[in-house]
Image: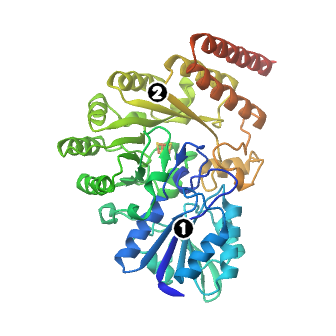
Amino acid sequence: MNQNKVLILNLFCRDKNINRDMAGGLGYSAGDGVILPPLDLLIIASTLRQLGKKVFFVDAIAEGINDFEVIKDLIVKERIGILIGNLALPTLKEDVEFYKKAREEFGDIKIVVKTGINYKEILVDVFEKSGVDVIVFAECDLDIMDYIEGKKKQGSVQKIKGELRFFPVKERFNKMDLLPVAARDLAKNELYKYVLLPEGKMTTMQTSRGCPFACCYYCPYPLVQGKKWRAMSVLRVIKEVKAIVFLGIKNVFFRDATFTLDMARTEKICELLIKKKIKINWWCETRINVLSEVLLKKMKRAGCLGINIGVETMDRDLIRIEGKPGVTLDDVIKIRNLAKRIGVKLHFLMVVGLPDDNALSLYNTFKYLTELNPETMGFTVITPYPGTEMFKEAFKKGLIKNFNWNNFDGSGINMRTKYLSRIEIGLAKHLLSASSYFLKRNLILKSFGIFLIDKIFRIWILLRKK
Ligand code: SF4
């Protein structure tokens, strides 16, 4: 096998459509309308090419490859010496099986796993079961070869003199401008899609990492990327956007946890996109308190079609205290109205089952959502991602009822909360999802659906009081 030949693989997942890049890199089930490229892997691919390696890239999910034999044939035919793949929570079992099989077939290749999971017990278990050479959960964009050669250790699991060791992350990568432009030319960009962007070639890009906000209590982004926000300069962002456009890609989903955290920087990015006449349709994700009228207008002019906005709950107290500390319901209403007037769509990201959620707070969420009627909304079930404060607390209190990681995909109901059983969390999720369905139907259907959901909520609250 040739150590100069590397296969970079987004592993298949047969069970369901999981995007391993989502939930900060822990994996998330976003439904059939979303297939995103594995951005981390494409950046690593770029670094390896710069080091003179011959890189092969396969996105088994996007390309619909479900058969180990296809990957095996490629490794044999090309005499691949290094295999780099990913690993996520909801696909953990399947991923481990894949690596185990690869190890059995190929005793002499290096097998490297890149993951967002940084929970010791899980990773040590994966390492032991799969027989891989190293698992890296640190940012290894530039120094992947150091991990492969055993020269770098922080943020990895590997064997040192025969002893299995877990090395926590010590420092975060801080020079975002040094990142190579992701090797999107290796990917079949026409296979990717994001339901909220128009059809046609699409890709993702990340201009910053980390998130400093207090919702890190339950959120996987700070867990995986750290709380310190680190960003590319405006010029570095434009350089990569130009490279994307050069590939004929017109749809870009910016995957930063909080794209507009530095509003002045985002304004400058928009200004340059406009000035240089770079025409892309783009979508991003951010927080209510880092948006303004001026910024929204510039974003619109620069091609922004919409924003995923973390709202979580529309209960007046819960949003302020727990859902989005520092944000009020009035802030949400204000931004919703502004965005509507300016013509930027909002996709509300909601979560069902915050630790202090109850029947009444969920009903309040339903009422305000019905009133505000955002263009689209998505409901995630509270997920105790291993390593978050919420996980630790829920674990201590015995609230987590299911430890099958396969179910940690944003829809699985794995814990109960102080006030809600798992059945109630499921009921609320269905009621809220149904309300978003009815809100987009004709007047008769909408009135009937909303009336019915309102009644069910009221009965639930009454029963709860008894
Ligand atoms: S602002 Fe968003 S990404 Fe940042 S911690 Fe809160 S929920 Fe997570």
Drawn side of residue 458 relative to residue 347, left or right: right
Q: Please say if 194 is above or below 76.
A: above
Which of disc 2 and disc 1 is earlier in sequence? 1
Residue 147: % across, % down: 49, 78
Figure label count: 2
Q: Please say if 426 is above or below 102.
A: above
User: Of the residues shown, which amino acid type is indicated by label 1?
Assistant: Leu
Badge 1 density bin: few <14, some 14–19, many ≥20, Cα 10 Å: many
Badge 2 density bin: few <14, some 14–19, many ≥20, Cα 10 Å: many
**Which corner quadrant of the image does residue 77 belong to?**
bottom right
Residue 27: % across, % down: 59, 53
Drawn side of residue 169 relative to residue 76, left or right: left
- Whether ligand 1 has any atom under 8 Å from the Cβ at mark 2 is answered as no
Please report the residue visible at 66 percent of the width from the left and 42 percent of the height from the top. Answer: 411
Q: Please say if 48 is above or below 304.
A: below
Q: Secondary structure at mark 1?
A: strand
* Residue for badge 1: 9
**Which corner quadrant of the image does residue 334 belong to?**
top left
| Residue 381 in view | yes
* Residue for badge 2: 328
